[in-house]
Image (cartoon, rainbow, N blue to C red):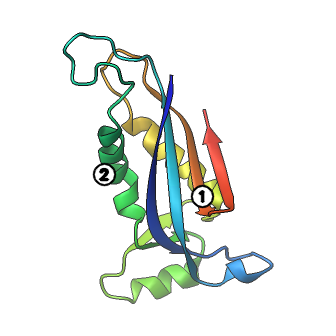
Amino acid sequence: MLITRRLEFDAGHRIPNHASQCRHLHGHRYAIEISLSGEIIGAEGAAEQGMVMDFSEIKRIANAVLVDRWDHAFLVHEGDHDVVAFLATLPGHKTVVLPVVPTAENLAAEAFRILAAAYVHTYGNQLRLQRVRLYETPNNWADAER
């Protein structure tokens, strides 16, 4: 069985070497879909009976390890030295320095890496992260899949 939870967050970024507008500082209303696979829990009386995982638990974990960290932050590549230095001058600014250029593809892959470790449960139902779909805009997204 495959289940999916969608969450949204706002973040800024730039693609330093982009040939067009995306080389400038700008932001997006991102949406992230987290798809997990596993067996439906059949344990009589279990809180998760009939589920792969409780959707509210998917949200709680995603917020704790990723969404709250990236929401209203500026996502910047560690090699984008001028922007990293500029953001460091802003007191209390929420900056996330990433090992990758923050394209939709790289952000989806980074989110998959972070979330895959977070969705390890002892439900005994072979739960695992299958896909992260990251929408940069309503019309553009990237999928990172197992």
Mark 1 or mark 2: which comes first in sequence? Answer: 2
Q: Quadrant of residue 66?
A: bottom left
Tell which residue pokes out farthest to the left in this image: 45
Q: Residue at x 58, y 54 (%)?
A: 134
Q: Which amino acid does label 2 sit on?
A: Ala
In the picture, measured across the screen, residue 36 lies left or right of residue 123, that is right
Foreground residue among 83 and 141 = 141
Foreground residue among 35 and 47 = 47
Callout 1 secondary element:
strand
Q: In which quarter of the image is residue 80?
A: bottom right
Q: Position of residue 29 (x, y in %)?
A: 52, 69
Circles 1 and 2 in contact, beta carbons < 8 Å: no
Tell me how far mark 1 sits from mark 2, CA to CA: 20 Å
Q: Which amino acid does label 1 sit on?
A: Tyr
Query: What is the crowding at mark 1: few (fewer than 14 residues within 10 Å), some, or many (at least 20)?
Result: many
Q: Which residue is drawn at 32% across and 33% down?
A: 54
Query: What is the crowding at mark 2: few (fewer than 14 residues within 10 Å), some, or many (at least 20)?
Result: few
Residue beneath label 2, please? 64
Q: Quadrant of residue 93?
A: bottom left
User: How many numbered circles are shown?
Assistant: 2
Q: Where is residue 37 in the image (x, y as percent from the top left)?
A: 49, 26
Q: Where is residue 16 in the image (x, y as percent from the top left)?
A: 68, 77
Whether residue 99 is situated above or below residue 126 in the rendered picture: below
Whether residue 63 is situated above or below residue 87 in the rendered picture: above
Tell which residue pokes out farthest to the right in this image: 19
Residue beneath label 1, please? 135
Q: Which residue is drawn at 37% across and 62% down?
A: 69
Q: Residue at x 35, y 29 (%)?
A: 53
